[in-house]
Image: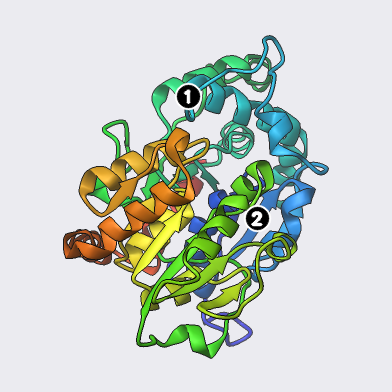
Amino acid sequence: MNATGLDLPAGGRALRILVTTAPGAGHLFPMVPLAWALRAAGHEVLVATPDSFVGEVLATGLPAIASSGPVRMGEMMSPDRTRPPVRHRGPGPEHVGRGFARLAAVTLPGTEELVDGWRPDLVISETSEYAGPLAAAARGIPVVRHGWGLAITPEADGFAADQLAGELARLGLSGLPRPVGEIDVWPASLQLPACTATDRVRYVPYNGARTTSARLLRRGTRRRICLTLGTTVPRVHGPDLLLDLQRALAGRDVELVIAISDDLAARLDPPGGNTLAVSWQPLALVLPHCDLLVHQGGAGTTLTALAGGLAQVILPHMGDQFDNADRVAGSGAAIRVPRAEVSAETVMAAMDAVLDDPGFTARARALRDEMRREASPMALVPRIERLARRALADR
């Protein structure tokens, strides 16, 4: 105990841990359980992100600070400083590396100012956030990379290093810094060979500051299907597919839960008939009471479904969704409908195929059980403490 009578974290004084993230729920949300585990252990945690995403961080209950002004990721992933946009089927390594490196160039000055002022003992960055690692490495602060989906390939990191050549030279770094640890939350059996994680941790779903109704937390007498296209896909491509599915399923002996932002929900039919809800939902609470999830294949949505042992129909539209869909469909836990073939008719046929074959659910539950065997985020706290204190002793 210290002079105030309060218990200190094991090993001495509380550590200061800076968490850095791109402005996206899929990047931040997988780190929230570990950040809270570190706070529960008595450490100071601060999250740095562009100003446009600070509100989402604050909604997690974690303290936040802006590392830059507002940022639109679409602009970051468009033309880089030297060449036109990269045209790609999915998240090609050049597109990913250069796009997130452009974000790092914007946030690096603010991140350096924060590091110099707050003086963290360790930085935890999600795998596509490069400013935190650069600012930390230039000051001898250890970095841990936290995954949120399939591994970022070495090729993507190579393009990021090329894009950030000027920043690396200014900081006196010969390349992207090597982390002292890498955390992976993706099921090991579905992960890419490129994964170099040193620590595996159980994926604990956090789906944002959302609420639901008690009705959705108990099963009815009919099969229940959850439909969602995540955050970005409906804004880019519109919610018409969800509306088509809602109307096509209106006469079926099923219940529907449609997870969509409140502003876009107004473009769908309101709840009624066999539609129980048309609004954002905390999927970790809702999905265990469903029989099937139809979704776009975002990492967070996919992992939440797998953690609940739920069979899926995946309709990838952009980015990492293609690879996520391929890996889960390849495991036998889902059917992937190619984007060019997506229609109400093809999606309903895939839904019927999954619902009629219990093998999909059996394989989804096997993946759930695999994930449950991993250590919880709380079990990782002593490892984080050791890494930080070892670096402090070496300074």
Q: Report which quarter residue 95 is drawn in.
A: top right
Residue 13 seen anywhere in this rendered image of the structure: no
Between 238 and 31, the residue placed more toward the observer is 238
> In the displayed image of the protein, which residue is found farthest to the front?
251
Mark 2 or 1: the one toward you = 1
Of helix, strand and loop, which one carries label 2?
Answer: strand
Query: Which class describes the residues within 10 Å of circle 2: few (<14), some (14-19), or many (20+)?
Result: many
Q: Residue at x 57, y 65 (%)?
A: 259
User: Which mark sits nearer the N-terminus, 2 or 1?
Assistant: 2
What x and y, as percent, mark residue 356? Answer: 22, 64
Between 6 and 383, the residue placed more toward the observer is 383
Q: Residue at x 29, y 36 (%)?
A: 192
Question: Which residue type carries mark 2?
Answer: Val
The residue that label 2 is drawn on is 47
Q: Are marks 2 and 1 in contact (CB under 8 Å)?
A: no
Please say if 245 is above or below 176. Answer: below
Please say if 184 is above or below 202. Answer: above
Residue 219 seen anywhere in this rendered image of the structure: yes
Residue 92: mark in rendering: 1
Please say if 218 is above or below 265. Answer: below
| Number of residue marks | 2
Side (left or right) of 254 relative to 80: left
What x and y, as percent, mark residue 194? Answer: 31, 31
Q: Residue at x 34, y 53 (%)?
A: 349
Side (left or right) of 191 relative to 111: left
Please say if 335 is above or below 266. Answer: above
Side (left or right) of 71 relative to 37: right
Q: Residue at x 39, y 47 (%)?
A: 346
Of helix, strand and loop, which one carries label 1?
Answer: loop
